[in-house]
Amino acid sequence: MKYDHATVEKKWQNYWSENNLFTTHEKPKKKFYNLVMYAYPSGDIHMGHSKNYVIGDVYARFKMRQGYDVLHPFGWDAFGLPAENQAIKVGIPPEKWTLDNIRISDESLKLLGISYDWSREVITCLPDYYKWTQWMFLLLYKRGLAYKKEAYVNWCPGCQTVLANEQVIDGRCYRSNCKSVIEKRKLNQWFFKITDYAERLLDGLNKLSGWPENVKTMQRNWIGKSDGCDIVFKVVDSDMNFTVFTTRPDTIYGVTFMSLAPEHPVVEDLVKGSEHETAVRQYIQEATKRTEIERIEKEKDGVFTGCYAINPANHEKVPIFVADYVLLEYGSGVVMGVPAHDSRDFQFAKKYNLPIRVVINPPDSELISESMTDAYEDFGVMVNSGTFTGLSSEAGIKAVTEFLAAKKLGGPSINYRLKDWLISRQRYWGAPIPIIYCDKCGIVPVPDAQLPVLLPEDIKDYIPKGKSPLAAVESYINTTCPQCGGSAKRDADTMDTFVCSSWYFLRYLDPKNENEFCSKTEADTWLPIDQYIGGGSEHATGHLIYFRFFTKVLCDTDYISVDEPAMKLFNLGMVLKDGEVMSKSKGNTVPAGQFIRKHGADVARLTILFAAPPEREMEWSDEGVTGSERFINRIYRLVIEHKSSIVKDVPTNIAQDDENLFIKINQTIAKVTDDVESFKFNTAIAALWELLNELYLSKKQGDVFGYGLFTIIHLLSPFAPHFADELWSLIGGEGSLVEQEWPGYDVKYIKSKTAIIVVQINGKVRSHIEVAGAIAEEEVKKIAFGDHRVQRHLEGKTIKKTIYVPEKILNIVVQ
RNA sequence: GCCGGGAUGAUGGAAUCUGGUAGACAUAGCGGACUUAAAAUCCGCUUCUCAGCAAUGAGAGUGCCGGUUCGAGUCCGGCUCCCGGCACCA
């Protein structure tokens, strides 16, 4: 008698969809927005993807059974490079390739039996979606949060496009099959002003108690707030001055030089016409040609500009250098060099024989600059610092900052590491930037009524040539100015796909709305996301910051009423095969469809869930499959065999010899309920195994036994929904278990009536005694001292004391 | 370098929050039952060392060293290694 998964799974999938069990309630009484991160349609889905969907599904079904009206949607992050690269390689249009992949993946997903409301499926590359992506761009534009500037940006020579900071990892392209070394290029590009929200993005993290600490820490580091002080240095014989940012104003008396970033625009004015001009120009040219990796790895160097600046604290003249270890984008792109107390400045000073002046001493020793081999960067006591001498660093930082503020030569300042989000991409397969350039009117946004700006289909050449392929499509690029009606040109770039994913969770709420991206009513009904289930921590400093940023902007503009998108975040560990992440490009995937046809969706689900806790990485192994298959068949046999003894009501009058089993059943309900709530699916399934094993060993097949079987069927339903529904109908249940209330338990039968007390002597386990629950310490001692195993160890010893923890342990301390 | 997280049988993992029988549950392995046989199934054993024919007994054991405690996988201090993130951020 073997369970036939193929027929049963088909049957129940049909039942669920015919009865609209997963169609979202229009007017939820108790809403629960359960969201799994949507996916890129790279081909068919494999077991690596399936993990996310299965885990999201267990939670969704559990919440449904707890009486929530669950919104559980799915969709596709459908724009992006792979589709376009495929088009270049084999000539299939990106749209066709993408939509074909979506069709195949949807089919596999449906085989898995995930409880999605398919009527809300969202596909970001379709015009009715990207119309609103463009609308978002314009909203930001109108708020002054989207702007165009000429800047040094990350250029990926492999993808032939620019990238955001978040997409550069160790100086290389983030795409796993690219990884090209990123170059710097000076280009005119669109940015989103996420830095305006730096403080709120940082502050908001404190509210997100349902987010994992590591993600919050990563975001804090990424935003990189640092409290410090601005200091103004005047340039000698010039009316120019520089503001530098420092976190250590207490070291101001130790400044012996200054450095400017090579890209700094004022360098030009500084050296123009001087004898140093040629050398400086040459240095700048070399520096800007280098990649970030080369710049970091090479020895620190620079070039003297011939100019000097005045230290506002001691009025000393210090030389100004151009040095490529100074970053243009951080602070003001100018730093004060304090070699004694900053190791980079130290290296630089050594190379160019600049003075090293100690102005901070460690708490109980004295530094001698000649014998220093590296900078002393810790806090200490100020020395050689005029009137500030003797102050601690902490006090000095405050005092110097106040002194500068009073003299209007600086003052308190805060800097963030976070940079504005570069969203232009020189590629075809993305949402077009809805901007028009008119010779007369300048930059003109496309009016809302003219959205969407459609991607042209009559494109012949997708190959990027340093600019967007769209630039060559005459019919697209040439247009008329919405303001003056004259001839004008469209922006040829498309948007970063992370723009699409910054608001997709809102479109699910109202996916067919043609007048708004989402009505306020729907937004207020469903937001925030109650549980967000993410694909891994690689999104921590990308998507998970971007979507928080969008939420805040939409909240400020009153389109939605929440300023954080998701209350709880659960980050999943990846699925590995042979020690590597399961991915198509590595060729180590286990295709979902194939696996399900062979073993069944429920086996696939149980295997994923039981292998490891969801947040941990999981090595896919075929051995796990054996266990899940056995689990299902074992339950199946037991239920079929004892169908007639199954009891649907909680038995009353529990006989003495049934008590232990009845307690086990109640404990299992309690444990599974708790574990599912906190995503501990592996131990939840282990608890079911325990109950199952106990039922197999049960000698008596009475009411309690029958109720045990009934309970297992119920508890199984989030994990193996087809199988559970089939068993449910076999025992005469109506419809599907998702329509049934989740079982409760009897608190009177959670604790065992007897307790095994461990008897220790000097902390070593010597015996176990079984006692009736709550008995007096004296009683326990009496039994323990009567135990021969205990007596053996007490012979000839003096008892010093005993420690008794009720129902747990008795420790006898002897000498 | 800085910030996280981790290290437990042959393997995946449990117990770690809140100190109280370490190894739940599964896999693999071994033994038994059933079978002409195999598979499947059911039952049992399975951390290591030593003693014993055996029942059993003794000792050791959660990366390493130390501490707190009657008692530490769990708490504290110091290391080692692994994984992830950040990193010329002034």
Image: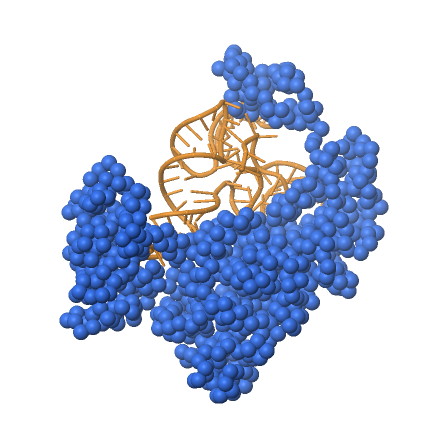
Total marks in image: 0
**Is residue A304 placed above or below A340 in the rendered structure?**
below
Front residue (pair A692, A316)? A316
Does A670 appear above or below A223? above
Q: Is residue A403 left or right of residue A145?
A: left
The orange chain is B
Quarter-of-image position of residue A353: bottom left
Seen from the viewer's position, the closer of residues B38 and A8 is A8
Quarter location, residue A752: top right
Residue A681 location, x and y as percent? 62, 48
Percent of width and height locating residue A321: 21, 62
Eyeballing the image, is A231 above or below A460?
above
Taking depth in this image into account, of A128 and A7 the one nearest to the observer is A128
Left or right of A237 on screen, residue A56: right
Q: Colour of chain A?
A: blue
The picture places residue A231, in percent across and down from the top left corner, at 28, 55
- Residue A65 at least partly seen: no
Q: Residue at x 55, y 56 (%)?
A: A564
Residue A276 image offset from top left, x and y in percent: 17, 69
* Colouring convention used in this rendered image of the protein: by chain
User: Is residue A182 visible to us here?
Assistant: yes
A378 left or right, relative to A354: right
Query: Is A352 rendered above or below residue B57?
Result: below
Q: Residue at x 78, y 33 (%)?
A: A658
Q: Nearer the viewer, residue A574 or A578?
A: A574
- Image point (53%, 78%), residue name: A446
Please give left or right for residue A199 compared with residue A769 in the image: left
